[in-house]
Image: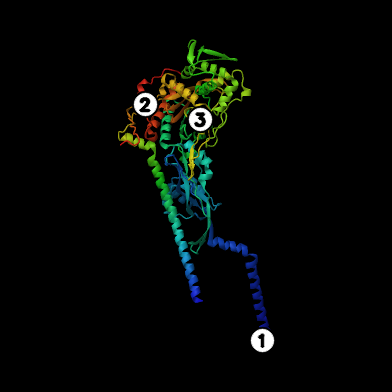
Amino acid sequence: MSARVANRRIRLLLAVFGLAFAIAFLRAAWLQGVRAGSFGRLAASQHSEEVTIPAARGTIYDRGGVQLAIGEQATTVFADPRLVRDPRREAAVVAQVMHLDPSQVATELADRAHGFVYVARKADPALAAKLKLRHLPGLGFYPEERRFYPQGALASQVLGYAGVDNHGLAGLELSLDKALAGRPGRERIVKDASGQAIDTVQSQTERDGSDVYLTLDHTIQANAQAVLKQTVARWQAKSATAIVLDPRTGGVLAMAVAPGFDANIYPQIWRGYQRNRAVTDTYEPGSTFKLMTVSGALSDRLVTPATSFVLQYSIHVADRIIHDAEPRGTETMTVAQILSRSSNVGAITLAEKLGQHRLAQWISRFGFGRPTGIDYPGESPGIVVPERQWSGSTIGNVPIGQGIAVTPIQMASAYAAIANRGIWVRPHLVDHVGDGRSVFEPRHRIVTRRVSKQVLAMLKNVVLDGTGTLAAVPGYQVAGKTGTAAKVDPDGTYSDSRYVASFIGVVPASRPRLVILVSVDEPRGAIWGGVVAAPAFSQIARFDLQYLDGGITPDAPWTSTSSSTYTGSP
Amino acid sequence: MAILLAGIVALNVAVLRLNVQLDKLNVERTQLRSEKQAMAAQLSLAAASPRIQSLARREGLVQADPTQTTYVRIRPGSR
């Protein structure tokens, strides 16, 4: 081989190497320059993973520290249908272990258009563990927290519920969602080739939700619910509501609505049963509203409890004739008797003495027509006709609790003001959140101490020898008022078959500790508050007085159940 | 130089071991939290008033009659 040929070959080899290096250089520049970002991300996704650390939802406790709503560990079962070999066979196994519908599971597992489908969200961890042991291809499992209400139907309308994403959807779960939910954390996990975590870089620590302590007492609540359930069954009523309130603090010890529901199965429950009627629903209060008329007349010093009036059986107001519940002749009644015998004519006479303007002012002063401000979502302000829209007959309706719509919590707080020496305290359900202190609720004086004392004394007569004798509690003095209000029919007239029977009472009357409201919607067989609601009040009060603080000292130890006989009507 | 390299490798290995341990502890924490939640649910169920009342009734207990209850007042300082 000549030197010329050898040189040519060396040059060729050099060119080939040069070209190869140029290609390699360009490729390297392409990979590390132009494609660096996307390849970097791809690599990161293979050896590291960004995960969200869910924050544990706070627990809701009653005032004694008993858990009413807690977070519970559950397992979510999911599937990648593209990895499922035999959807029908796997579906049969899944359905059998997890107690699911096989055809529905089969449809989900056969859906190869998706790479991820839920098989069972937040399922029982024990069942999920059994399924995991079957090693079915395409199935995956991850832990999740689910909301659990250990006492089922206890205070379910008050607590509300949290949805599948652990966020509050109703009740206190909704209104306190921000505090209960906390803040999820984030961390980046660096994994080795086998998927084992070798490094964890925490970018944000999760902050668990705060615990919430309520004013509710689970024992008082359970008893109130049991009594309401019996009452609804006894009178075949549509529903019933009860509130047990501490008049000194405004703390709600029980807020019960029957029929109730188990918050653990809320999606299956009719929305109407989920409503907290004590706060969101209004009703015409009937005779229980006479308390406002009488308090106003006493406060304005127009009358005293002993002031007497000659009252006919009926009274003419504008175009209406209103009469008392029971036929009677013309009688002389004191203000105290007007209340104890629940005389419509008497209450209207007092309202006429007060005058339209002052009556409207007293109604507003007791807080009607605006929300109480209770810490529960969706509170209704009630319906109070503005004074400028009053007709000639309004002064014949409103003083006896007609033509006005109120919520049970408004009525309970108005009576609580009388029980609390004339001072109104905002009712509340939440005592404190997290380590915070109990909030001192806003309060203001409505009537003087003198008037509240006079009104309480008159209310005692309602139970001693008036329309509320069945509300008596052996051993204790009870002050209270019955109410029977006709509901409005769709044609706008008052019904003669649909009523709301109610009773609101204060115990022990000498040193009030509890205000209890019971209202029964559309009872059958009897309609009177003194017959339908008063016995339920008595049952609730009797239990609560023995239970609270180890027993409230009786203020009338000489009384017994045998003295309670019903004599009146409304 | 070799000692320095060996030190760096040993340090990295120690960090990796600690991370694996941390991962295990996190799993354990989740498990313990789950157990705590389950026990809290059990406690709440056990404390449920209707359950206690029904157990008491089964044992023959009845609700006390308020008229039969006597309250003793103890004056401060009395023995």
Q: Residue furthest bottom?
A: A2
Residue A284 position in % (x across, y down)? 53, 24
* Horizontal side, residue A423 vs residue A151: left or right: right
Between tags 3 and 1, which lies in front?
3
Q: Residues within 10 Å of mark 1 (few under 14, many from 20)?
A: few
The amino acid type of the residue labelled 3 equals: Ile
| Residue wearing tag 2 | A475
Q: Which amino acid type is marked by label 1?
A: Ala
Q: Nearer the viewer, mark 3 or mark 2?
A: 3
Which of the labelled discs sits on residue A423, or is there none? 3
Give the alpha-carbon distance from disc 3 to disc 2, as whole Å.
27 Å
Q: Is residue A206 above or below residue A16?
A: above
Mark 2 or mark 1: which is in front?
Answer: 2
Residue B19 in sight in this render: yes
| Residue A524 makes an appearance in the image | no
The earlier-in-sequence mark between 3 and 1 is: 1
Left or right: B48 as drawn, with respect to A186: left
Check disc 2: other Cα within 10 Å, few if <14, some if 14-19, many if 20+. many
- Viewer-proximal residue among A269 and A371: A371
Q: Disc 3 versus disc 1: distance between alpha carbons?
A: 115 Å
Q: Which image quarter: residue A564?
A: top left
Q: Position of residue A506 (x, y in %)?
A: 44, 27
- In the picture, the disc for residue A6 is 1
Q: Chain of mark 1?
A: A
Q: Are marks 3 and 2 on the same chain?
A: yes
For marks 2 and 1, the one nearer the N-term is 1
